[in-house]
Amino acid sequence: MIFLLILQADTLMNKSFKTEQLFALIISHAKELMREPSVLFWGIVFPILMALGLGIAFTQKAEMTERIGIIETKNDLSDSVYSIEAFLDKHAEKIHHANSPDEYKLIVKNKKLGNTVYIFQKMNWKEATILLKKGEINLVLEDKNGEIEYNFDPAGPDAQLNYLKLSKILGSSKPVIENSENIEPLTLKGTRYIDFFIPGLMALGILMSSIWGLGYTLIEKRSKKLLRRMIATPMKKSYFLISFMSVRTVMNFFESLLLFVFSNLVFGITIQGSIVALLLIFIAGNVNFAGLATLISARTANPEVGNGIISAVTTPMFVLSGIFFSYQHFPDWAIPIIKIIPLTMLADSVRSIFIEGAGFSEIVLPFFILFAMGILFFSIGLKMFKWY
Amino acid sequence: MQQFRDNDSVIEVDDVYKSFKTVEAVKGISLRIHKGQFVALLGPNGAGKTTLVEMIEGIQKPDKGEINILGKHWKGNEDELHNAIGLSLQETRFIDKLTVEETLKLFSSFYQLNKNRINEIINIIGLEEKRKSYTVNLSGGQRQKIALGIALLNNPKILLLDEPTTGLDPNARREIWAILMQLKEKSQTSLILTTHYMEEAEQLCDYIIIMDYGKILREGTLNELLKENVEEHYIEFSLDKILFHDELFKNSGFNIEWGRANNKGLLILKDIESDLPEFLNFIKTNNLQLRNFESRRKTLDDLFINLAGRHLNE
């Protein structure tokens, strides 16, 4: 769409509308792309593998295993019936190791939440500190005169969960979390993690493929002096960039389509909202990221510098935009900023169409913002663009 | 030799300057190139040849001075001039996974040329059997040929070639020369070619401009240039033993340049009848024996050494 607009503006402004040029450029870039097998792998196979891996990791509810540190105490009360050791001796299975201290294995059972296997290991504070730093444990128990002290970082959700579970059972007579009647597992379509993840992965795929495929390629072509050679002809400069963008958009379309077909077959993911709205937001996302890629690649001729710039732009988006996990965990003040990041806007819109059943009216605002931002990026990029 | 008249100049460069952050690359150069004329810009690396050519190509803008091509400035006439000029840059790499034919097709679309022209070009540059090869798989010489082919696609009035044969082996170099000689016979194209090979300038060009440090040192036809100090005789010699220092020659009173790398000397004599016997006597009294002793014609490199104190390819 943007390309058509630019083309039209071009024809109106000067009469030299050279379709052969644009056509030949598009054909050349398409051939160039298709002849690079690694492009197909990283563009198409890799996102699918990622979806498969993460999808399986988060949808199959296996037993969770958690390690807990116990600080050995040398006071007389350690024999007390309330002490951790006494409790474990009674309820947990003792595992004997030849070269390392004994461990206790305690299986906390719950039908609805799934079982959690706790491995308790005795250690001193020095060892515990090392394991905490390595992330191998997140909770350390210490017997303080018969009272259990829970040492953990309150900001860590996993540690918190372990604390809540263990504080409920340690010291009680049964190591079981009550099969609470009021837990009702959700099986509704669109509420699984994979439902959340696939639309985000699609948005991320468009970003990565646009920025690397477009931005990096332009920088590389500049470093090979190819840009310099090409503009020493009557070629229209804008056509050169437009041909790149069109080829990339078509390729992104097939990438997203394949990812969708795959996740539909494997995870049963469907589009609950409007397909037209999805296509529109897809185009807006492509325009936005293509514009961003032009801007990123406007100046440097050094692929290593380009690498750095691309990482600097994509990494924050990657981390903040809630592709893998919801950005609602970030501090409140950050959320309005996160929401206007292009990748967030695209991912949120795609997600709302996929799982909330959104139509055009829900995505009209992000559509125009993404589109307008993209055109702005592109115009600035084109102005700054160094052809040699 | 063709005669070029003043009123048929296709390129006019007037007192042009160009500096970059740390270097003044071109320091006040003026030149005129006529229709059909083949001109060499001869000079070592860093002489400012590429900067000068790139200003003519419209890639760089001069800081000062004027450039007119076919009577026009670059500003406002880009499309027209791009259509009239063919060029090859130093070491261009094309799109790796496009074939020779596809690369030519892409460039021909920029000039709106038809398929016949692509076939003609493939024929001219002799890459018929490489037509379907990816450019990434071509040898250095073949890559230069395709660069030249692209430069010739639009039947340019002006051809600008920046070091078209640097790094090529003698065979590949001669093939490129043959293509250009053929062009010279068949068309009215004017050529500017930069090079640091004196043979290239001698073989191909009617007019040679010798440059160093951003300035023109000398210019003229080959004969005009070599006429300077025409009374000098150049004699190359080698000895039966290896000399590790040239003290002996330095203090001899003769004009001798001793090349330790190849163990060869160059003797320059003004008055051969009286000086030569003296030299032979000098060799004898120093208990040396000549292994090789030959007189050769003066070259552009000799002239360059006279002017700049170093070799062209240093």
Image (spheres, coloured by chain):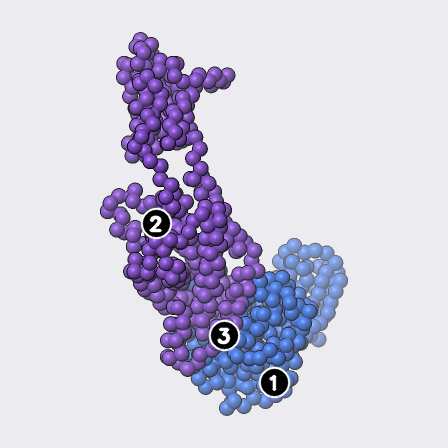
Chain colours: A purple, B blue
In the rendered image, residue A224, in percent from the top left (x then y), is placed at: 51, 63
- Count the labels in the image: 3
Q: In the rendered structure, are the residues bearing label 2 and label 3 in contact, judged by CB atoms less than 8 Å apart?
A: no
- Residue receiving disc 2: A321
At a point 60% along the width and 82% down the height, the residue shown is B206
What is the chain letter for disc 2?
A
Q: Of the residues tagged 2 and 3, which is closer to the observer?
A: 2
- Closer mark to the observer between disc 2 and disc 1: 2
Residue drawn at x 33%, y 45% is A326
Residue A196 lies, with reference to residue A89, above or below; the image says: below
Kind of residue indicated by mark 2: Ser
Tell which of A268 and A315 is nearer to you: A268
Inspect the image, locate mark 3, and give the three-letter code of the amino acid beneath it: Gln
Frontmost of labels 1 and 3 is 3
For the point 44% across and 16% down, which residue is it? A94
| Residue type marked 1 | Ser
Mark 1 → mark 3, Cα distance in angstroms? 27 Å
Question: Does residue B27 show up?
Answer: no
> Would you name the residue on which mark 1 appears?
B187
Residue A180 visible in the snapshot: yes
Disc 1: host chain: B
Q: Quadrant of residue A92?
A: top left
Neighbours of disc 2 within 10 Å: few (<14), some (14-19), many (20+): many
Return the chain for callout 3.
A
Distance CA(mark 2)–CA(mark 1): 62 Å
Viewer-nearest residue: B135 or B7? B135
Labelled pair 2, 1 in contact (Cβ < 8 Å)? no
Instruction: Residue B71: name its quadrant.
Output: bottom left
Task: Give the structural element (helix, strand or loop) at label 1.
Answer: loop
Q: Nearer the viewer, residue B140 or B47?
A: B140
**A144 sits to left or right of B131:** left
